[in-house]
Amino acid sequence: MRLLGPFEVVGPDGQTITPRPAKMRTLLVLLCAHADTVVSTAQLEAALWTDCRPRTAATALHVYVSRVRKHLEGHGAEPVGIATRCAGYVLESAVYDLDHQRLRHLVQRAERAEALGAVTEAVDILQEATALRRGSALADFRDVRVLNSVGRQLDEQFLVAYERKAELQMRLLRHAQLIPELYAVAAEYPTHERLHQLLMLCFYRAGRTAEALSVYAQLREHLVDAVGLEPSARSQRLQQRILHFDTILDESSALVI
């Protein structure tokens, strides 16, 4: 079950088996997003019928759950994956491979490795974690209010993992290798200051001062246009240090200025 991008269900043979009917997909996404937690019938009905809930919603919900089970079982999934509870339904994470849960587990492994001083191992684990992302989480469900919120939360989980990976790579003096992918991620989040700060520092350490300052100028332009704010004091301070070729920026520990 892949939520870190457009929703996708992949069968045991590696083939995509995402249900086609919209309500079946919505139901499955909501259960996946709250795996191991009972999702109430009221929550499910509200997500399935955003405009006007029919009087037969409870019966229809039961039918959709049955169809989802049959669809998954028909492609080799375990029949016990979606369980009925008195208050609603629950998807068992032990039965399915959920990419957002794998991301969280990998981040925890990386934290343990870093705590033991194994920075290179932590970077490798975080690389595996961030590679799970295929685009904005639940990009095809952002028009469903409750799932838009879930998608944004999953995006934040990715960003936290990615920022930490980038910081550790810079600690290992891998700034030149980091620039291409960091540039792409920063472009996707044009007002995310931490990503742009790291990109500025990467460019500066690679001897590309003009490009480092250009990143700041673009960040400022986006912030002013989007929310009418100037960059934070930290971003401004970093720009000034770059302008003055401050030697502190050359230190591998200089990640927070």
Image: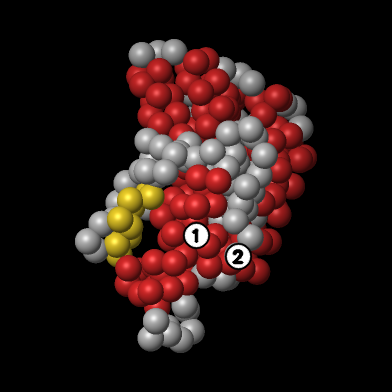
Residue 67: which numbered mark, if any?
A: 1
Q: Toward which corner of the image does residue 25 lie, by quadrant?
A: bottom right
Between 45 and 206, which is closer to the camera in this rendering? 45
Q: Is residue 243 above or below residue 53?
A: above
Disc 2, SS: loop
Q: Residue at x 64, y 21 (%)?
A: 174
The amino acid sitting under disc 2 is Pro
The amino acid sitting under disc 1 is Arg
Residue 172 percent coordinates (x, y): 56, 17
Question: Nearer the observer, disc 2 or disc 1?
Answer: 1
Q: Is residue 133 visible?
A: no
Residue 71 percent coordinates (x, y): 54, 52
Between 31 and 134, which is closer to the camera in this rendering? 31
Q: Residues within 10 Å of mark 1 (few under 14, many from 20)?
A: some
Q: Residues within 10 Å of mark 2 (few under 14, many from 20)?
A: few
Residues at circles 2 and 1 in contact by the CB criterion of under 8 Å = yes
Q: How many numbered badges does the structure rendering display? A: 2
Q: Relative to residue 104, is residue 180 drawn left or right?
A: right
Residue 142 percent coordinates (x, y): 56, 65
Disc 1, SS: helix
Question: For mark 2, what is the residue?
Answer: 21
Residue 119 percent coordinates (x, y): 47, 17
How far apart, in angstroms, are the residues tagged by discs 2 and 1? Answer: 10 Å
How is colour applied across the structure in the image?
Answer: secondary structure
